[in-house]
Image (tube, rainbow, N blue to C red):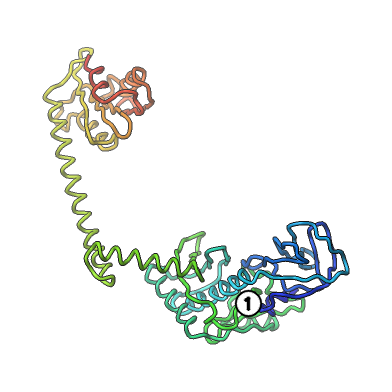
Amino acid sequence: MSQLAAREPEVRSFEATVADVDGGAVTLDETYFYAESGGQPADRGTLGGVGVEDVQKRDGDGEIVHHLADDPEFSVGETVRAEIDDEFRTYCMRAHTASHALYGAGRKVLDELGYGGFDIGERKVRVDFTTSTDITDETLAELERLTNRAVWDSLDVSWEEIPEEEARERDEVAFNTKTEEGVMSDSDTVRVVSIDGWDWAACGGTHVADTGEIGPVTVLDRSNPGEGLTRVEFAVGPTAIRRRAADVRAAREAARTLDVGVSELPEAAERVSEQVEQLEADLSDAKEAVLSARLAELRENPVERDGDEWLVGTVADFGPNEVADRARELANGDGDGDAPNAVVLAGEDGATFVVAATGGEPEAGDVVDEVTAEFGGGGGGSPTFAQGGGLDANPKEVVTYLQK
C-alpha cells in the first residue's frame, strides 16, 4: 500500500474518519502520517488531540496503525483532526533527499556502486554503500563537495510510480535491497524518486521538491559495518552547521598553534608528525641507554641468595614489558655464558610489579609466588620467566626483602 505521506509530503494537517480503535492503536480511513519503513522513522504529531508516538504498517493487510500515547476518547466513525509534527517531518524530508543526493555524488566517484542500507537518526543519517572503491578521506571530501553542489544547483526532485519490470530494466534506477519496504505498491508498480539529472532510486520515503531545500550537508565519518560495506554518516540542518563550525574553529586553532595558514595545515601536521617520531625514537634510545646502565650496575653488585647468585634491583620509569626481554637476556648471560641464577627486577607502572627470569632453577614462577605471598597481588608464568603485579609495597621494599 503506497503511503499518502510519500505522495503528498507537504500535508501537515488533515481530517479523517476513525476506522478502528484498539486501546491506543488507531486506524483511519486515510492518513498522511508516514509509517516507519525503508530506514525513515515514523511521523510524530497528534490525533484528536492525543499524542502519536509511533506509526506502523500492519503485517498482512498493510493498514497504517497510529499508536497513541493514551487511549483516545473518540470512537469508530468519528471525524478527527490530525496534526503532523512539521519540524520532524521537514527534517526527515531533507535528510532522506540528502541521502539520494549523496548517492548521486557516489555515482560520480565510486565504482561498482550499490545500496547496502540507509537510516535516518535524530542527529545524523547513514548510507551504506557497496563499492569496490576505497573511500578515503579525500573521497569523503569529494562526496561532500558534490552533494552540496547538487544542493546549491537547486535540482528538481520528483516521484512517480512505474511498472516494476520497467524500473528494474532502467540501469540508472538504484534499488536498496535491504530497505525496499514502501517501494512496491499493490499493483506491482515501483515508486521511483528522481533528482533531475543526478539520481534515480526506488524509494517510498518523503522528499523535498527541490534539492535547495535540503540545506548544507556535512559528512561526519565513515566505517565498515560488514564485509563489502562502507558506511558514510552525514548531517543536515543545525547539526551539520554546528559540526562545520566546530571543524573550522578547530582548523583555525591548529593553524594558529603551528603558525601557518589553514591551507598549509596538512604539510605542517606532517612535519610535526615526523618530528614527534624522531623525538620518540631518541627517547627510546635514551631510555634503553639508562636501562642498560642500571642493569650493568646490578651485574657489578650481585646478591647471594640460597647459595646462588641473583641480580636484584629496582628499575625506575620502566614498565614490566619494557624490562622483560632484558631480564631474559641477563638470565641467559647476554650470550657470553656468564649468567646469574636469577634476575629479579621491581618497578612501578601504576602499581608495583616484579619480573623474574631464571635458567629454570630456581623456577621464576616460584620467585614471583614468594613475592606475592609476602606483599599481595598476583602473577604467574613459566619456570624461566614470570611476573607479578598489584603488590602492596614499593619497589625498594620488594628488593630489600629479596636481598635478605
Q: Is residue 273 left or right of residue 134?
A: left
Q: Secondary structure at mark 1?
A: strand
Depth check, front residue: 219 or 197: 219
Q: Amino acid at mark 1?
A: Ala
Q: Quick check: 383 left or right of 316?
A: right
Q: Which residue is mark 1?
A: 202
Q: Quadrant of the C terminus?
A: top left
Expressed as whole percent of the image width and height from the top left, the position of residue 113 reads: 50, 74
Determine the image quadrant of residue 76. bottom right
| Camera-side residue of 62 and 217 | 217
Compared across the picture, whether 66 is left or right of 379 comes to right
Q: Quadrant of the N terminus?
A: bottom right
Residue at image coords 79%, 60%: 25
Above or below, 340 relative to 24: above
Residue 359 percent coordinates (x, y): 25, 25
Horizontal arrangement in the rendering, residue 144 relative to residue 340 (left or right): right
Residue 331 in which image quadrant: top left
Residue in front for this viewpoint, 345 or 90 = 90
Indicate the position of residue 172 as horizontal and vertical percent values: 56, 82
Residue 73 coordinates in the image, percent (x, y):
83, 60
Residue at left offset 86%, top offset 69%:
78
